[in-house]
Amino acid sequence: MSTMILELQHVFKNYSLEGRDIPVLKDINFQIAEGATVAIVGPSGSGKSTLLGLCAGLDQASTGSIKLNGIELSGLSEDKLAQIRNQHVGFVFQNFQLLPTLTALENVMVPMELRGIRNHQPVAMVLLERVGLADRANHYPSQLSGGEQQRVSLARAFANKPKILFADEPTGNLDAETSLIIEEMLFELNRASGTTLVIVTHDLELAAKTQQIIPIKGGQIQ
C-alpha cells in the first residue's frame, strides 16, 4: 500500500478583485504517492502555478483540505508553513532564483545553513559534482550560463533531501538541447534520492516522462 505524500480534497482558490471573488481553482481532488513522478499540465492561465503554490504551502486555499506528508496545511501560520517547507519541500523555478551575491557553492549551501546542518560544504560540493559543476563552484550566477544556473538550482533543491520537489516550468527559459540535459539530471537526482517529483509544465514531451499526469484547464482537473 503506497503512502500518500500529497492529498487534495475539494480545494477551491478565489482571488478578490475590486470587491469581486474571481475563482482560479474549482474543486480540485487528487492524491500523489510517495516517490512518484507527476506532471501538472495545462495552458497558460489554467491555474497550474496557483495549484503548485497551494500544494507547496506558499499560499492558502480558500476552502478545502491539502495534506503534505500527513500535515494539514489549511489554517497554519506563515511561520509554521515556512518551517514545513524547510523540512519537507524542495523547489526548482523557471528563472533559477539564485542569490546573485553568492557563489554556486554558497547557493547550494543556503538550505542546509537554514536548517542548521553542520559540515555542509562537502555535501554541497558532492551535489555540484553530480550536476557536473564542481569546477564552477566559486563562480557567481552572472558568470554562469542559463543551463549552468539551473543545474546549480537543481543541486540546491536536493540539498535538504526533500520529501517532495516542486519544479515550476524547470526548462521554460532554456533551449531544447539544454532542456534535455536538465530533464535527465532532474530525473536522475530524483531517482537516486527517492524524492517525490511534481513538475508544472506545458511541455507534453516532458510530462510524458512522468508516471502520472494531472491535466488542468480553466481551473479544473480535466
Image (spheres, rainbow, N blue to C red):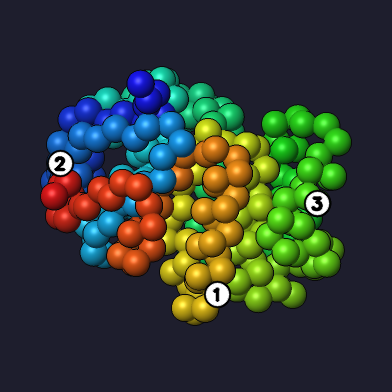
Q: Is residue 34 above or below residue 207?
A: above
Q: Is residue 155 above or below residue 6?
A: below
Foreground residue, 138 or 171?
Answer: 171
Question: Distance of mark 1 from mark 3, alpha carbons?
Answer: 22 Å
Q: Residue 174 appears at what percent x and percent y? A: 50, 74
- Choose mark 1 or mark 2, whichever is in front: 1
- Choose mark 2 or mark 3, whichever is in front: 3
Q: Residue 80 appears at what percent x and percent y? A: 51, 24
Please indicate, yes or no, whether residue 16 appears anywhere in the rendered image.
no
Q: Residue at x 23, y 64 (%)?
A: 43
Q: Residue at x 31, y 29 (%)?
A: 7
Foreground residue, 215 or 51?
Answer: 215
The amino acid beneath tag 2 is Lys
Image quadrant holding the N terminus, namely: top left
Q: Residue at x 79, y 43 (%)?
A: 123
The answer to which quarter of the image holds residue 141 is: bottom right
Q: Residue 178 bears which disc, if any?
A: 1
Residue 6 left/right relative to 216: right
Residue annotated with mark 2: 26
Q: Residues within 10 Å of mark 1 (few under 14, many from 20)?
A: some
Foreground residue, 172 or 1?
Answer: 1
Residue annotated with mark 3: 125
